[in-house]
Image (tube, rainbow, N blue to C red):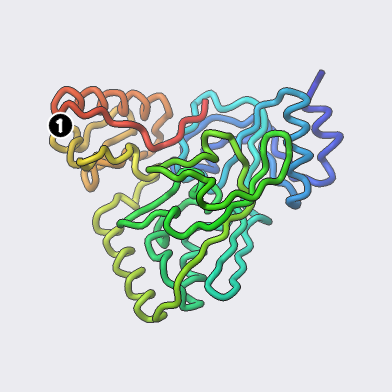
Amino acid sequence: MDWKKAFGREFAAQTHILWQEPLSKHTTFHIGGEAECFVYVSGQEDIPRLLKFCQTCQVPLHLMGNGSNLLVDDEGVEGIVLCMAEPFSRIHVEGTRITAQAGALMGRIAQKACDEGLTGLEFAAGIPGSIGGGVIMNAGAYGGELKDVVTSVEAYDEKGNLLTLSGEELHFCYRGSAMKERGLFVVSVTMELQPGDRSQIKFHMAELAKKRREKQPLEYPSAGSTFKRPEGYYAGKLIQDAGFSGCQIGDACVSEKHCGFIINKGNATCSQVRLLMEKVIKGVEETSGVTLEPEVIYWG
């Protein structure tokens, strides 16, 4: 069965379809080969149909938010990449509760919370990802994590059934959750915040933004922190102490500004990044006995 023709017939009217779309255009790393099929759907009601189609036709389905934590293989990915951007970016505030669709950027949600005088999301203001991807990996920064504020999530399972999971059912852990293990497709996230002073919230967000500019290589494409923080250590410090500051393979480079970031200095490839990651992991293990784990998600 030619799934591409079947997909075109069934979804052409409700979706925006791009064939052989370079994923380097959709990731913050600016790295990645082509997706066989890159899709924007017109509404939430199209998602269960798409999930059922992929299950019936045995087509791989990949979910993409802002592409901020992804390293995509140079050969690209097979199947369909579903982009949860527009129109899945609405944010609704009711009292101290914020509900955001999966494609809403965490920075926008944090700003909306600030505008409404709600505190608890300041840490998320500089995280470039969408809330859908963020909640799957329990994104966090500067002492805050999404597990601290998320009360429930709406998500589809692979059969297209819509589930509502409470915060307790999500089983958040460091840079992970039950959704990641179960392969659920998040469509909305509800968070409970606290009333706060708008000027203080704004000041705190500005302070964190200043720290990021000073300490992180925001001037280069990257996927954020390349490695998870090992318990009791800082990945960047271990990498620096192992002598890898500025280490480069092709255009993939360990940032001298913050060794926890591997950056793209121009035309880095996925294979160059992966070789550099392997080199760093081996070197850190030899010098400190600590095994670094990737935080960046690999597609290939």
Q: Is residue 286 above or below residue 298?
A: above
The residue carrying mark 1 is: 242
Work out which residue is located at the far top of the displayed protein and give it. Answer: 1
Q: Looking at the picture, tell me which residue is in the foreground, 189 or 58.
A: 189
Q: Is residue 133 above or below residue 1?
A: below
For label 1, the SS is loop
Q: For residue 293, which quarter of the picture?
A: top left
Q: Position of residue 273 (x, y in %)?
A: 36, 30
Q: Looking at the picture, tell me which residue is in the foreground, 252 or 92.
A: 92
Q: Quadrant of the N terminus?
A: top right
Q: Position of residue 194 (x, y in %)?
A: 45, 72
Number of marks present in the image shown: 1
Q: Is residue 200 above or below residue 179?
A: below
Q: Is residue 131 above or below residue 238?
A: below
The residue shown at (57%, 60%) is 190
Work out which residue is located at the far front of the displayed protein and give it. Answer: 168
Q: For residue 225, which quarter of the picture?
A: top left
Q: Amino acid at mark 1?
A: Ala
Q: Position of residue 242 (x, y in %)?
A: 15, 31
The residue shown at (17%, 38%) is 240
Q: Position of residue 232 (x, y in %)?
A: 20, 41
The residue shown at (81%, 39%) is 11
The 10 Å Cα crowd at callout 1, few under 14, some 14 to 19, many 20 or more, is some
* Left or right: 25, with 60 as reference point: left
The residue shown at (77%, 33%) is 52
Q: For residue 125, which quarter of the picture?
A: bottom left
